[in-house]
Amino acid sequence: MTRNVTKSIVVLIVILLISSFVVAGFITGYRYVRKQDERFANLRSRFDEHGFSPITKDTPNAVEVYIPQQADSEIIGEILIDKGLISNLLAFKLISKFNGFDGEYKYGTHYLVPGLSYDEIMVLLTNQPEPVTVTIYEGMTYLDIKMKLLDAGMRFNPELLDMMMDQPSLFMDFSFIRQIEAKPGREWLLQGYLWPDTYRFDINATEQQIIRTFLSNTEYRLRQGDYLDRAAKIGMTIDEVLTLASVVQQEGPIVEMPKIARVFMNRLEQGMPLQSCATINYLRKEEGKSARLWIFHDDIDRYSDSLYNTYSHAGLPPGPINSPGLVAIEGVLWPATDRTWSGAGQYFFFCARGDGTNDFSKTAAEHDAKVAQYSAAP
């Protein structure tokens, strides 16, 4: 065998080996991509079933992973290494870029389990993590809302949230903030601006993120209803509207709110104190006491120094006493008129019947007789 023949055979063998490696690599790569597609499809179907990640804090061996806002693949990779979920940062970054996941990772608290492949981790982290869902009802105070968030498992600092509730200047980008008045004796400057609704929060949402979520909804609702313009048209600030609406919210059923608002506005126009049981009950609640259907002189005297006592002090209380609902707000912005309620401008009193409705009166004598009647009823 000549040297040239031997050389040709060697070259052929090398070519065959290289071709075999290429074919094997292609087959391996093809199988990997197929399996990857199957894994992705499986994860996505599980996302479709749950709406959020199929892995939760209750999944066996679940590892909590918090992704900061605007975190890139390198920061996320370092977090995953620290949690023991991956071992190679460079591989994570390359696969992330290859799969097109860079810039797609979702902020928030995710849950993963050991043993997931890099691409499975990426799919999970590029989908929205399951939030904490909290429903805020009309008439809830800030303290009610704070407790509900804590009871739902959120991990914010309550003292820091308290501090931010008294710092509207942190949120000057919202249009209504400049109308909030820091009056003497006012508690929780942002109380009344946490719009009643159902919210979804990340379990580790910061105090500022929580408040901003509420205020963003409030901004949207106020603009949607043109409430800022309507308030200006009737000579009130939105702060005054929400303050009065919060009192109306606690005083009667929805169908009566425009009438209750009219009574209060009649009293304000005449310089009369509101004499609202709602404001006294607010003070009782702040002290951990239960609300009363009828307010007696002992409570009026006990809270005589508080500007929220609308028996002892004329005008509106210093600020909202709760988060009023839409009907209460619109009741103040569009109170009952003579067209909808005969003699609307002549009513100055109302009292609870005890069945959830109110009885309205035009004179103090008529009102006192009704109070005696209903309070004496069994």
Image: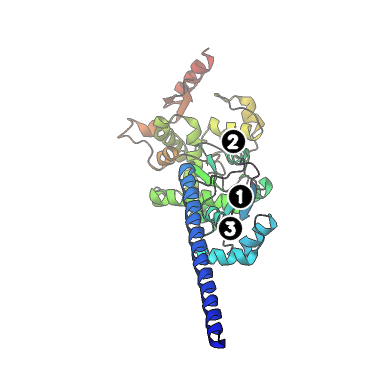
Residue 60 among those drawn in magenta: yes
Q: The N terminus appears in which quarter of the rendering?
A: bottom right
Q: Amino acid at mark 3?
A: Tyr
Identify residue for label 3: 118
Relative depth, front residue between 20 and 347: 20
Helix or strand or loop: what does disc 2 sit on? Answer: loop
Identify the secondary structure beneath mark 3: helix
Residue 91, how many percent across, how many down?
61, 65
Left or right: where 362 falls relative to 87: left
Report how far apart the C-alphas of labels 3 and 2 lie in the structure: 62 Å
Can residue 33 be seen at all in this image of the molecule?
Answer: yes
Give left or right: position of 240 versus 229.
right
User: Disc 1 to disc 2, how far (Cα)?
Assistant: 53 Å
The magenta-colored residue range is: 57-62
Tell me the residue that label 1 is attached to: 112
Residue 14 versus residue 282 in the image, above or below: below
Task: Tell me residue 17's x, y (percent).
Answer: 54, 72
Q: Which residue has dot 2 on it?
A: 309
Nearer the observer, 73 or 220: 73
Quarter holding residue 281: top right
The amino acid at mark 2 is: Asn
Q: Is residue 194 visible?
A: no
> What kind of residue is marked 1?
Leu
Tag nearer the camera, 3 or 2? 3
Measure how far apart labels 3 and 1 are at the Cα level: 11 Å
Question: Which image quarter: residue 305?
Answer: top right
Query: Mark 3 near mark 2, Cβ–Cβ under 8 Å?
Result: no
The image shows residue 50, relative to residue 368, as above or below, that is below
